[in-house]
């Protein structure tokens, strides 16, 4: 089959963009007046999911061997969260007028598909004065949460103006070879903090899904994501980007990872990685692929 021309790719991309926007509108307004799902709008230049081979390789590279978290994840007496991450959306490039650097911007949404909430609570350490964060877990058949292990700290992000749980996500860009083979890591943002909130309903038909948002506000005492809800960070926010200054034209894989160090106890970890293929030319996104 002959390759698509650039014009046909652009038309196809525009059609897909309109389709995604229509789907997002339907989900946002809901069916029969009910707000069921909030879906992000995707970039017309972002390709479909990577091949199974690339996805498998990325999972091997980006998921650390399970440590103490694995024991909790196998504990059937607990209602555990299950963090899943949407494909990166609203992907575009932005150049800085002051520094002259080039940034790849994108949105992220992480949601909870588990049987229990992701609940975190902060407590000040008298010695260090840090807000240490502990995960709280809910046993099956019991609404009384139990304190779990320490999973990090709440730190004040002056650009966002509120407290973040540090290292909640990780963003990376990998280069692709001529045959689409994963080559190497070219850009990374390893310590992305989130204020954990019930921002958008994703799947309220799930068992134990919250009927209304439970976690609101970037509080020091408690933050979380309820079952069926997602926490969204749009592309315009600080840290929703990667520095791609001086990167050559070519094909890449944009990767986002939730709970990258597995500090948070979950039901599963292999579904914490999401990736899309993109192409860069002259510092801008173009239809994938280029030069193949």
Image (tube, rainbow, N blue to C red):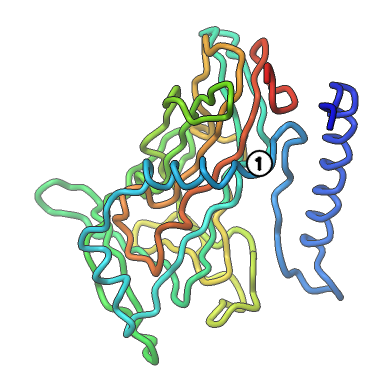
Q: Residue furthest left?
A: 127
List the residue tagged with mark 1.
89
Left or right: residue 21 compared with residue 229? right
Numbered disc 1: secondary structure: strand
Looking at the image, which is closer to me, 52 or 16? 52
Give the image quarter of residue 188. Answer: top left
Crowding at label 1, few (<14), some or many (≥20) Cα neighbours within 10 Å? many
Where does the image place residue 143, in percent across and percent down from the top left?
39, 86
**Which residue sits at x=27%, y=65%?**
70
**Residue in view at x 16 percent, y 54 percent:** 125
Furthest residue toward front: 1
Figure quadrant of the N terminus: top right
Q: Is residue 128 above or below residue 225?
A: above
**Compared with residue 3, is residue 43 higher up or lower down, i.e. above or below?**
below
Answer with left or right where residue 77 lies relative to residue 158. left
Quarter of the image for the C terminus: give it.
top right
Left or right, 208 with reference to 203: left
At 52% from the left and 43% from the top, the residue drawn is: 53
In this view, the residue in front, 4 or 127, is: 4
Q: Position of residue 144 (x, y in %)?
A: 34, 85
Query: What percent of the width, then of the height, locates residue 56?
Result: 47, 47
How many marks do you count on the picture?
Answer: 1
Q: Residue 183 versus residue 269: which sits nearer the camera? A: 183
> What residue is rendered at 32% in x and 54% in y?
262
Measuring from the top left, give residue 158's x and y in whole percent.
42, 35
């Amino acid at each position: 089959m002959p390759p698509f021309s650039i014009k046909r790719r652009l038309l196809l991309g525009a059609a897909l963009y309109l389709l995604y926007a229509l789907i997002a509108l339907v989900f946002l307004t809901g069916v029969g007046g009910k707000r069921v799902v909030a879906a992000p709008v995707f970039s017309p230049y972002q390709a479909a999911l990577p091949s199974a081979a690339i996805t498998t390789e990325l999972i091997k590279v980006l998921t650390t061997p399970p440590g103490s978290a694995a024991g909790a994840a196998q504990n059937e007496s607990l209602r555990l969260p299950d963090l899943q991450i949407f494909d990166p959306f609203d992907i575009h490039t932005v150049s800085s007028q002051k520094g002259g650097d080039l940034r790849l911007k994108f949105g992220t949404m992480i949601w909870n598909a588990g049987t229990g909430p992701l609940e975190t609570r902060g407590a000040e350490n008298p010695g260090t004065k840090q807000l240490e964060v502990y995960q709280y877990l809910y046993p099956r058949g019991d609404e009384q949460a139990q304190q779990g292990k320490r999973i990090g700290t709440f730190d004040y992000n002056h650009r966002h103006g509120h407290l973040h749980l540090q290292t909640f996500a990780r963003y990376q860009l990998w280069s692709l070879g001529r045959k689409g083979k994963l080559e190497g890591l070219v850009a990374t943002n390893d310590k992305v903090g989130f204020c954990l909130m019930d921002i958008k309903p994703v799947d309220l038909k799930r068992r134990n899904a919250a009927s209304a948002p439970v976690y609101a506000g970037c509080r020091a005492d408690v933050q979380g994501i309820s079952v069926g809800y997602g926490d969204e960070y749009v592309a315009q926010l600080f840290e929703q980007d990667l520095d791609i200054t001086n990167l050559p034209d070519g094909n890449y894989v944009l990767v986002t990872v939730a709970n990258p160090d597995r500090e948070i106890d979950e039901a599963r970890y292999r579904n914490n990685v999401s990736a899309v293929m993109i192409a860069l030319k002259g510092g801008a996104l173009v239809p994938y692929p280029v030069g193949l």
